[in-house]
Amino acid sequence: MCDRHRFTFNIALAYREQALDQFERSPMHPLLSHEAPELLGVYALYIENTAKKPVYVGKATKITLARRLSEHARKIGGRRNIDVSEMWCRYLVIDTDGEEWVAASAESALINHYKPEWNKSGFGGHVPGSGRPGVRVSAWDAKYPPK
C-alpha cells in the first residue's frame, strides 16, 4: 500500500481534544454551592466566574467530585488572603469503568492546556510529606496562610 492511502488515528490526541472540548462546554458553579454529583471525574477551580483560566485542575477518582470540591471549599474557607465566596468551579463527569488512567489522562490534558498556577504549589490536599518536621512551607501555604 502506498503512503498516500495510509490514514492514522491518534487516540491519545483525540481523547485529549474531546476532554478539553467537553470540559469547556460544562457550566461554571459557585464553589460553595457546586451541585457536583457523587460521581468521578475531573474539575477545575477559578477565582471569579469570568476567569478564562483555572487556578487549579484536579481529578476525583478515589472520592467523588462532590466530596473533593467540598474539601477544597473547606480548605480555602480556612485561609487568609482569599475568599471562598469568590471561587468557582467546573467539572466533567468521566465514566472511568474502573480504569483510573482515563480520568488521569483527562486531568493531564487540562493541566497541560491551562498550566494552572496552583498545581504543584502545594494546594492539593494530599501533599506528600506535609506536616513532617523540616518540610518547608509550600508556596500556596505561604500565599494563603491558615486563619
Image: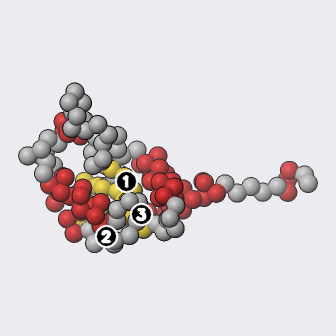
Where does the image place residue 98, in percent across and percent down from the top left? 50, 64
Label 1 crowd bin: few (<14), some (14–19), many (20+), radius 10 Å: many
Where residue 65 appears, as percent x and y from the top left, is 34, 64
Q: Which residue is mark 2?
A: 36
Which residue bears the numbered disc 3? 41
Q: Position of residue 75 (x, y in %)?
A: 19, 52
**Residue shown at 51% from the left, 55% from the top:** 101
**Amino acid type of the residue tagged 2 in the rendering:** Ala
The correct choice, above or below, for 56 with respect to 42 in the image is above
First-in-chain label (3 vs 2): 2
Secondary structure at badge 1 equals: strand
Q: Earlier in the sequence, mark 2 or mark 1?
A: 2
Residue at the outermost right position: 1
How far apart marks 3 and 1 lie (CA) works out to 9 Å
In the image, what residue occupies the spot 35% across and 44% down? 119
Q: CA distance from mark 2 to mark 1?
A: 14 Å
> Mark 1 — residue?
58
SS assignment at label 3: strand
The residue sitting at 85% across, 57% down in the picture is: 5
